[in-house]
Amino acid sequence: MAILKIARMGHPVLMGIAEPVEDPTNPEIARLINDMVDTMADAPGIGLAAPQVHVAKRIVIYMVPEDRTSDGEGHPLTVLINPEIIVLDDAVEDGVEGCLSLPGMSGPVARPTRIRVQALDHQGQALDYEAESFHARVIQHECDHLDGILYPMRMSDLGQFGYVQEMTQAQE
Ligand code: NI
């Protein structure tokens, strides 16, 4: 088990295009994924992309807690290798996002609500499924990391970007 250092916004590894993984079953990839799982749990977070731990490879992990979905159905820990996202319809919705690479900050981002995901899992098996609402948002946020995109770059109103603590206190 190893907890890896998380790169913060400004580090070049977060700004580049990550490389595809040639062999998902390579033991080094397996070790990286295990370390990413430990790192995400420690943070704690619900999603992590390999560039966030200074590895420019197309790997993300995520999970959706039950209390973060309207239907109460969570999504278990999932590994996506070389993921591709297909947007299934034009509907978009705003949702507040945060990121382990921008600790303490959050802001609303409009994203498509229905997507299809194609990827390989940690055993090299093909995954192909649809995701909606918060689940779709998490996947899109994490996959953006593989293309050097951080969520503030997708915000339409940077006036709503800020420190969670300040915004929470202002509401009280
Ligand atoms: Ni992030």
Image (spheres, grey):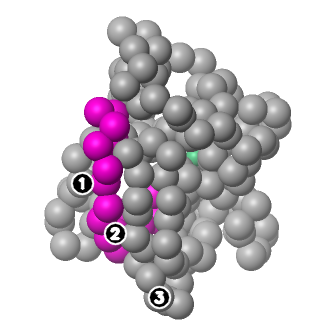
Please, what secondary structure does the residue beneath circle 3 have? loop
For the residues labelled 2 and 1, the Cα–Cα distance comes to 10 Å
Q: Is residue 161 left or right of residue 25?
A: right
Nearest to the eye among marks 3 and 1: give it: 3
x, y percent for residue 36? 44, 26
The disc at residue 116 is: none
The type of residue carrying mark 1 is: His
| Dot 3 alpha-carbon crowd within 10 angstroms: few under 14, some 14 to 19, many 20 or more | few
The disc at residue 131 is: 2
Q: Which residue is painted at 69% across and 51% down in the image?
A: 147
Of 95 and 26, the residue lying toward us: 26
Q: Which residue is painted at 72% across and 59% down in the image?
A: 152
Of 109 and 14, the residue lying toward us: 14
Which span is picked out in magenta?
A: 121-139
- Which residue is tagged 1? 75
Q: Which residue is painted at 50% across and 38% down in the image?
A: 59
Q: Is residue 81 above or below residue 135?
A: above
Of 106 and 57, the residue lying toward us: 57
| Dot 2 alpha-carbon crowd within 10 angstroms: few under 14, some 14 to 19, many 20 or more | some
Please, what secondary structure does the residue beneath circle 2 have? strand
Whether label 2 touches label 1, CB < 8 Å: yes
- Which residue is tagged 3? 89
Residue furthest left as drawn? 72
Q: Earlier in the sequence, mark 3 or mark 1?
A: 1
